Amino acid sequence: MRAMLDLTDKQTDPSDVYTRLAYEVKEQGGVVIDDPALTAFSAHKAKLHDLLVQHQVPVPETVIVPRNRVDDFRITRDIRNRVGVPFVVKPAWGDSGVGVIVDATSEYDLQMSRAQAPLSDAFLIQQQLKPKSIDDRVGWFRLYHICREVIPCWWNPETHEYQMVSPAQIKRYKLQPVRRIMRKIAQVSQMKKFSSEICLHEDGKFYAVDYVNADPDMNPRSFYANGVPDEIVRHIVWLLFYEAMQVAKRGHGFFDDELEASEASANWLERRRVEQAALLVS
């Protein structure tokens, strides 16, 4: 198999049959969209957060708390001044909003997030962003990065409704930063297929909020009221199909200068097995 498109929603589960298949395809010299080691690394919000900060990607003010420090951790005055109140608590490992508390105010919320996410080894205390209004729209965006192409959408975090962002709107509302931020996230994470959320905060600046979702929403609007516009879904499918065909013809990866996985993601699957076992025992 020369190319494999990994569409499982359990990329961070080392026991998942499709995750194991992805590693096997990679081991046999095939190209997996996306590389399972990179996917596992990018799914860890705390590790990716630190990497984004190092590369000057704008992100909310954040404090990272290891799981073993939750019991004695205190929200000091300095932390409150940094992240504000209320703030957001989210597990470093987590899917579908499990363990995410958007109106947190105290250490109790941190402990509650830990209880809801038993396999997460760290937690983020994060500034709660307030989106700025742009005419009759909320300044919140969900963007897709698919094989070097960025597809921006207006996205309402309360109704979860999508609208396409037109080139004219990019120019009119000066939204060019969302594309630049998205490309920077792709460069840092080395991911090819993912979605992110970017907020235009009330201070007038853009911030990446949900960094890398390796299993992006692909529910079409023709079947779901708040789904992705069908034309976007069709375009994404075409981009992935075209890229797989190019891989098959070339016989190598996506970029001529494709970077090797960093040391941070090497042997990630085995380390993840050990971490999960230790957390379940504790």
Image (tube, helix red, strand yellow):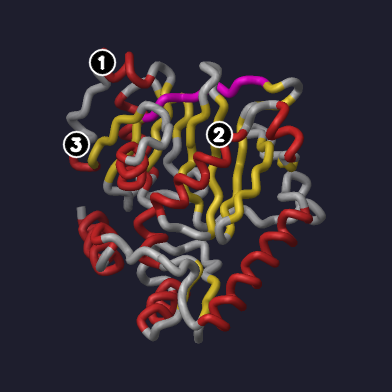
Question: Residue 115 sits in which quadrant?
Answer: top left
Q: Mark 1 falls on what kind of element?
A: helix
- Of residues 163 and 275, the one nearer the viewer is 163
- Of residues 78 and 99, the one nearer the viewer is 78
In this picture, is 193 found above or below 167? below
Label pair 3/2, CB-CB below 8 angstroms: no
Q: Mark 3 falls on what kind of element?
A: helix
**Residue tagged by mark 3?**
69
In this picture, is 163 found above or below 32? above
**Residue tagged by mark 2?**
177
Q: Mark 2 falls on what kind of element?
A: helix
**Residue tagged by mark 1?**
78
In the rendered image, residue 62, in percent from the top left (x then y), is placed at 34, 30
In the rendered image, residue 121, in percent from the top left (x then y), is placed at 27, 48
Q: Residue at x 45, y 81 (%)?
A: 30
| Left or right of 166, for residue 14 | left
Q: Residue at x 34, y 36 (%)?
A: 124
- Mark 3 and mark 2 lie on one chain; the one further toward the N terminus is 3
Give the extent of the magenta segment.
126-133
Name the amino acid, label 1: Asp
Name the amino acid, label 3: Arg
Q: Residue at x 57, y 37 (%)?
A: 178
Is residue 77 located in the magenta-colored stretch of the structure?
Answer: no
- Of residues 218 and 48, the one nearer the viewer is 48
Q: Is disc 3 surrounded by few (<14), some (14 to 19) or many (20+) residues within 10 Å?
A: few
In the rendered image, residue 195, in percent from the top left (x then y), is placed at 55, 50
- Mark 1 and mark 3 lie on one chain; the one further toward the N terminus is 3
* Front position among marks 1 and 3: 1
In this picture, is 60 found above or below 42? above
Question: Residue 158 sits in which quadrant?
Answer: top right
Let me know if residue 276 appears in the view. Answer: no
